[in-house]
Each structure stands twice: as C-alpha cells, then as structure tokens.
Image: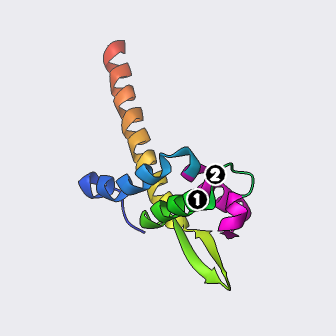
Amino acid sequence: MRAVRGRAGIDASAPIFDALGDPTRLRLVASLAEHGPQSIRRLTDGSGVTRQAITKHLRVLDGAGLVRGSRRGRESMWTLEPEPLDLAKRYLDLVSDRWDSALDRLKKLVEE
C-alpha cells in the first residue's frame, strides 16, 4: 500500500475523490461493498439510471482504480477494489490528525 504523504499523497488521492464525488458512483461503490461483485443489470435494477449511464459511471470508477470489470459469459461483472478506498481513508485520517493538532495548538494559545 502506498503512503499518503505530501504532494504525492494528494496526487494519488485526487482521482479517487473525484470519482466518488458523484452520487451515482458513490451508490455503485456502496452497492458493490455491501453485495459483492455484480452485473451491470443488477447494478442498474431499481436505480432509475440507464445501463449505458451505469456503464459510463463504472468506467470512471475503473479509471480511478476503485472497481474492476470482468466478463462472465455475456455479462460484465464488477468488483470493488478496496485499496484505493484505503488510500482515501488514510488521506482523510491524515487531514483529520492535522486539524486536531492545529485545534490543540489554538486551544493552548487561547488558554495561556
């Protein structure tokens, strides 16, 4: 797993956050996380979104490394790739730690 430090960590995390910034893509990731690998047909069912649109969203997620597609007969199956989500979580943890540290310094300054 890659470290999340400095500019390299930001650059590595940006495509992940960009892909997750769309509500439909976020729902797709959540569905894959909850239910495991799924076909486009299953991911489309009940979504109110066309198969073509779901396919485009899956390609964006694939480009960010968040999902992986494979063929099973005539269907495309999609699987969640957890490593990019781990990278995003580590980046958010780093930002949170920096904010906590800054707030602690501010608190000490105000209390003096």
- SS of the residue under disc 2: loop
Q: Height in image: 38 above or below 8? A: below
Residue closer to the observer: 111 or 48: 48
Q: Hey, which quadrant is residue 76 in on the image?
A: bottom right
Residue hosting label 2: 49
Q: Residue at x 38, y 66 (%)?
A: 2
Q: Position of residue 33 (x, y in %)?
A: 65, 60
- SS of the residue under disc 1: helix
Look at the image and tell me in which quarter the C terminus lies.
Answer: top left
Q: Position of residue 54 (x, y in %)?
A: 58, 59
Q: Residue at x 55, y 53 (%)?
A: 25
Residue closer to the observer: 32 or 90: 32
Q: Position of residue 90 (x, y in %)?
A: 45, 53
Whether the residues at callouts 1 and 2 have beta carbons within 8 Å, the answer is yes
Q: Amino acid at mark 1?
A: Ile
Q: Hey, which quadrant is residue 9 in on the image?
A: bottom left
Q: Is residue 100 magenta?
A: no
Q: Which residues are magenta?
A: 25-44
Q: Work out whether mark 1 precedes mark 2 in sequence or the reverse, and give the earlier one.
A: 2
Q: Height in image: 101 above or below 5? A: above
Q: Amino acid at mark 2?
A: Val
